[in-house]
Image (cartoon, rainbow, N blue to C red):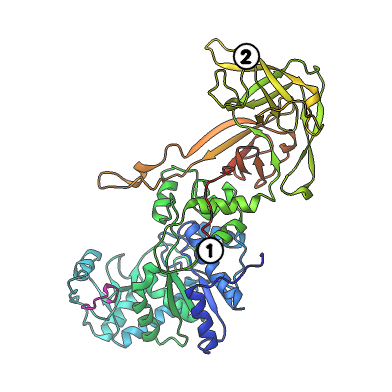
Amino acid sequence: MENKPAVSNFIRNILVEDLEQGKVDKIVTRFPPEPNGYLHIGHAKSICLNFELADEFKGRTHLRFDDTNPLKEDTEFVEAIKEDVKWLGYEWEQLFFASDFFEEMYNRAVLLIKKGKAYVDDLSVDEIREYRGTLTEPGKESPYRNRSVEENLDLFARMRNGEFKDGEKVLRAKIDMASPNINLRDPVIYRIAHAHHHRTGDAWCIYPMYAFAHPLEDAIEGITHSICTLEFEDQRPFYDWVVRECEMEHVPHQYEFARLNVTNTVTSKRKLKLLVDEKVVDGWDDPRMPTISGLRRRGYTAESIRTFMRETGVSRSYSVVDEKMLEHFIREDLKLKAPRTMGVLRPLKVVITNYPEGQVEMLDAEINPENPEMGTRQIPFSREIYIEQDDFMETPPPKYFRLFPGNEVRLKNAYFIKCEDVVKDADGNVIELHCTYDPETKSGSGFTGRKVKGTIHWVDAKHAVPAEFRLYEPLILDDAEEDENSSFLDHINQNSLEVVHGFVEDNMKDAQAHDKFQFFRHGYFNVDPKHSTKDKLVFNRIVSLKSSFELPKA
């Protein structure tokens, strides 16, 4: 990974202080996703923060899968998450699963029962919710709250042995039903789920709740700084209660930061799953999705995402980052790396009537003018070429400097051409242009006889390689607010994907998956790894070429 400057933030300051005061001798962090979906850009914030903080202080980071809900989790998600973390450029010190610790979690729950700190409850989910109270009213105790230790131990063992149906009983922590923090009103810590687990199979039919399992895992693994987003702040008292009452030898501490919010970007896993299930997108890796796999398929680089995460900073204040900031960093990353080339997305044929029939010449062009070390490429040029439909107007407005009848333009890296005639179909649509060229005006020849105001790109028709181009806009727009009469799916941007078919240069015919290019005037594109083949090139537009966005001045 590239060298990176240390970026000060309040969590980093805590780490520095803890090390200086001897509270810890080694920083140990973790990234703990639940394997019930694919990671999205919000997860990337946590990944970068946890791994880079530990790396800076020569500590270690664990990758841990919180697989406590077999109804929603799958090995597919486990493997996808591993791939995403590696692709972002990080290596975990150790790999854990919550399921590694199921036996110890069970034993710690038994300890709570023996201490009178947990009980088996027969209330239904709805009844527990009703008994819980509100933010302004205390809860009331379950009629089963004062069962004896012996009865609770017996019932909990029978829960494990599979004697009860799903939802028939739960194990709850015994804390305080009048606590102003609702999370301390006897939260459920085990539920029954007769479901096949992706790792433990059918060995268990009771599973710990996330809020109970998570602090135990941190303690077992020796995590020093449990870094999470602010929605878990209210859970911190229960986190500390679990560690203390379960008598864990190691005591981790939880710290919260504001989650990453990006304009026009949905990061609700439930909503993203809905988009996949309803086939609004073609999978979790659809280039319109904010998943890491979707960003990768679109063409974003790991370097651009890491830089974006560092620049957005770490705080406890809610804020929304402009999506154009992420686009800025992929442009910055690719401007010196991506070869320049020409692609015609909506082709219009041009016949250069005074160019010799059958002749093909090779023209020289820089691969990347901003990076001369990349060298040059050769482009075939002959009598027939394709240009963009948008680069011709039969009746142009004022200050239109591209091609129109009687006007002369420069072909990028080639010659001046002048439009002499227009060919139309029966419906009056322009289908072909007849132009002449001036052989004295070849690029690089030093011609100074006259100037033209327009330069347009093109592709030689004889050597053109057919290609599909996929142009993206946000899938969900921020101004598409949900209300009581509509659902999330009612606000899908129907113009989020436009597919057009055109041509690219001959030297693109061997382009491979994830190869990235800058197409003259159109922007940066990535060869789609899912649908592109040798016989059918498919390009995803990563970002347009320019933006008015500027980074805030320091």
Q: Which mark is residue 422?
A: 2
Q: Amino acid at mark 1?
A: Ala
On the image, the x and y values in percent for residue 217 come to 46, 76
On the image, the x and y values in percent for residue 449 come to 77, 26
Tell me the magenta residue range.
177-184
Residue at (53% x, 81% y) in the render: 16
Q: Tell me if I can see residue 237 in this picture.
A: yes
On the image, the x and y values in percent for residue 256 come to 42, 72
- Earlier-in-chain disc, 2 versus 1: 2
Residue at (47% x, 77% y) in the render: 218
Q: Tell me if I can see residue 207 in this picture.
A: no
Residue at (45% x, 47% y) in the render: 276
Left or right: 411 with respect to 64? right
Q: Residue furthest front?
A: 449
Left or right: 50 with respect to 270? right
Residue 321 vertical position relative to residue 276 in the rendered view, above or below: below
Q: Nearer the viewer, residue 444 or 2?
A: 444
Closer to the camera: disc 2 or disc 1?
1
On the image, the x and y values in percent for residue 517 come to 66, 43
Q: Secondary structure at mark 1?
A: loop
Q: Secondary structure at mark 2?
A: strand
Q: Which mark is residue 554?
A: 1
Left or right: 270 with respect to 125? right
Alpha carbons under labels 2 and 1: distance apart: 54 Å
Q: Is residue 83 magenta?
A: no
Give the quarter of the image for residue 229: bottom left
Give the quadrant of the N terminus: bottom right
Q: Main secondary structure of the magenta part?
A: loop
Q: Residue furthest bottom?
A: 22
Q: Nearer the viewer, residue 221 or 358?
A: 358
